[in-house]
Amino acid sequence: MVFLFSLLLFVLLAAVFASLGLNVWARPRAAIDRITGNEVELEQAAIRHPSLVFHDLIDRLGSLLPASPKEATVVERRLMRAGFRKPGAIKLLYGSKVLLALLAPLAAAGAVAASEADPANKIMMLVGATAVGFFAPNEYLRMAAKRRQKQIRRGLPNALDLLVVCVESGLGLDQAVVQVAKELESAHPEISEEFALMNLEMKAGKRRAEALRNLGERTSVEELKKLTAVLIQADKFGTSVAQSLRAHSDYMRVQRRQEAEEKAAKLGVKLVFPIFFCILPSLFVVTVGPMFVRIIRDLLPMINNM
């Protein structure tokens, strides 16, 4: 088992250093110079920042991981919900998965190399570290998407009130969306970015209903989906957008009040466990502790002397 462990560690180290050498340092400079001439020499003479080299390494590692088109579509949707919308975001995700899957077992091997554990347990630890390193970016992506959805949900009431004010003051829906995106750029940058992207889609030639539908699907926030559905229906049937927004704003305000009342009603039940496990033991120590000290110090000697 010791030989198998050493062989596995050697293979992992050899794969990591070979990949780094091929992707970072091995450059066919002579061939490129013959084909392109002096421009390539000037480009290679420029000093590259280490972060760009690391970004290039992760990008190339991401290209090594195969993925089906269906899986790539699902991952792209998750990346959009988390706010990562650059063209190479999916390659960076896959590259980070490969890099962490290589570095995590190396760190685990360094941690368990000096221990006296069973070799089988060491191998299982290496396998577990590889799995953790491979799936950690997915968990980070899920948490980032959840955090961004929470920020969008928090800034939606302010955006809706501003939409109502802008529309009732005489602006059209498109101009109102642009104004809301501009006003909320500092307070709620997430929802401001989404509204600005919707405005860019409409400027690019998409219909308003399609841009609104893309806004709801891109964020995957239920409250925003309801708002886009209201705007699509108002645009489709020709009803007043201001009245629709005002009614939906009142509905969301009542819904938020009910959610706050629900959380307040659950507070008593949630406080049972902290009170029972954190506050009551300290109260017992403060109130009953001195009495136990006096019993041990005064009463027990009197009982022993009787």
Image (spheres, helix red, strand yellow):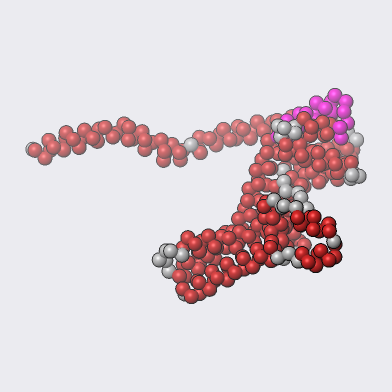
Depth check: 295 or 131 in front? 131
Q: Is the stretch drawn in magenta largely helix, strand or loop?
A: helix
Q: Range of the magenta residues?
A: 155-175
Q: Which of the 4 image quarters holds residue 55?
A: bottom right
Residue 41: x percent and y percent?
79, 58
> Where residue 168 sits: x, y (%)?
84, 25
Residue 51 vertical placement versus 254 (above, below): below
Give the residue at the far left of this rendering. Answer: 306
Q: Nearer the viewer, residue 296 or 106?
A: 106
Residue nearest the observer in this picture, 247 or 156: 156
Q: Residue furthest top?
A: 169
Residue 151 can be seen in this image: yes
Residue 13 locus on image (x, y percent): 57, 67
Question: In the rendered structure, does residue 166 fall within the stretch colored magenta?
Answer: yes
77 is within the stretch colored magenta: no
Classify residue 216 as left or right of residue 102: right
Q: Residue at x 46, y 73 (%)?
A: 2
Image quadrant holding the C terminus, namely top left
Would residue 76 be seen by someone viewing this image from the given angle?
A: no
Q: Residue at x 77, y 40 (%)?
A: 194
Q: Nearer the viewer, residue 81 or 284?
A: 81
Query: Height in image: 78 above or below 196?
Result: below
On the picture, is 277 further left or further right than 188?
A: left
Q: Position of residue 216 (x, y in %)?
A: 77, 44
